Amino acid sequence: MTHLMIGWERETPVPNHVFNDFLSARNGRLYFEDLDLAQLLAGGGPDQGLGKQLPSPLEIVYLPKIRGKIEYMTQIFARAIAEVGYAGRFHYAYASKANTAEEVVRTALGSGANYEMSSSVDVAIARLMRSGGYLPPGRLTIANGFKGPGTTYMEDLIALKSVHEPVVPVVEDLTELAPLIESGLSFDVGLRQKSYGQHRTELEMDQANSRFGMKLADLWQAAETIAAAPNLRLRLYHAMIGSQLTDRAAFVAGLRPTIEIYARLRQRYPDLSIFDFGGGMPVPMTLDFHFDYEAFARLLLTTFQEVCAAYQVPVPEVMGELGRYTTAEHGAHLFKVITVKDNGSALPWYIIDGSIMTSFPDSWALGEHFIVLPLNHLDQPFRRVQLGGITCDSDDIYPPKSSASPLYLPVETEDLYIGFFCIGAYQEMLGGVRGTKHCVLPEATELVIDRDEGGQYQFLLLPGQTTDDVLKNLGYRPVWRDT
Ligand SMILES: Cc1ncc(COP(=O)(O)O)c(C=O)c1O
């Protein structure tokens, strides 16, 4: 296949079909696990516990998916550890930058994840999670990001230590060590290697054009400074090479030079015990995705075994800071097709009641693909179309301009609803939450969905923005409404 598969690619109806492990067509309607999505907006089926229809557009936040993902990856590594006889454990950390919404962070931590953060607001969130009982006392909080002397982030991290002991600052730059030493508090610290990109050698890594992490000479100097400081202990080594890395052999090969550096550091600094590969774990954002997570975990662990044996050091505990993997699939955004415009363009335009470019900035900015499927009329013939958002921006379209992926939707457009899927990571954070967006479109209503222990759905409805909300954001005082 020469293109990514973003939906149904035929003109024939697809009344019953399994698209992936959570999306299926049943009798012409699309289900997210057991939830009839069209029913939420258009009715037409048995009530699912909400007791009413919701307005379109609608954001879906499906929390059980987050739990499922964390559980699955934890099991994958547990199995791989047993299979290859690995003498170390796996730490799952949630990279909160992927989606920092309260219910998302709470759910990830509630599923046993450690917390990876990158700013001073994240520290405030860690405090709230701690006081709310979601961040248990022993859970690691890994602090990445820039936190030089005098920054609020560094000050907040030092203060967090008195509330939550296992704070692990990951040093990005030599200047970050002084405030930690001067704090007088005992810190386990990490070191971040400059490693972003696919590099085969240490020299390539050192010469890479990346603002993250330290070059090798600085890394060794930082390790020396930590060893000499009475209150610091080198515990973690962090090397991240990219995001959405779908080639498992290349993923591990890209980490290999960093594993060698870890082993050399470990020879000299015996407290070092965690190798943190950061993010990169890929996730199915289209329907043709295949990645063998078990084979990846085995290859990673056996590579650690091989390299560490060569350097005669114990294998590390392994940490992943998984952002996209944890949250991409729990988010969906539903729209109504409000009009069909056939104006002689290459394909008919299906215009939706919201904005594609502000809801999913990566589709516009990076040409990234997401799954798009109709929520109803799946039992009707399809045709090839293009989607247009309701803003006046020529980039507010889908598939992205650079895409070769065809999009098929039902010919029947009476009350047609569609969904964008796998948009839960980064898109909302990049587009902004509760802000004012392009062409002053109000933010959609949000439905937070969970399941109780008996499997019953539980719903929390967060109303969208009103016109007044948007006007107030922009400094208007809607006086005409006072009279
Ligand atoms: C330091 C760090 N860790 C983890 C992540 C999460 O990466 P991913 O979304 O690929 O899991 C990022 C993403 O930018 C990052 O910068």
Image (cartoon, rainbow, N blue to C red):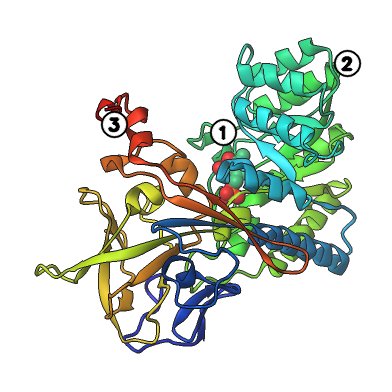
Near mark 1 (Cα within 10 A), the count class, few <14, some 14-19 or many ≥20, is some
Res. 4 image quadrant: bottom left
| Residue 102 position in % (x across, y down) | 63, 42
Residue at the left extreme? Answer: 344
Examine the rendered structure and indicate whether residue 427 appears above or below residue 231: below
**Image quarter in which the N terminus is found:** bottom left
Labels 3 and 2: the sequence-earlier one: 2
Q: Secondary structure at mark 2?
A: loop
Residue under pointer 2? 230
Labels 1 and 3: the sequence-earlier one: 1
Q: Secondary structure at mark 3?
A: helix
Q: Is residue 476 visible?
A: yes
| Residue 350 position in % (x across, y down) | 25, 67
Residue under pointer 1? 212
Mark nearer the viewer, 3 or 2? 3
Labels 1 and 2: the sequence-earlier one: 1
Cα separation, mark 3 vs mark 2, equals 65 Å
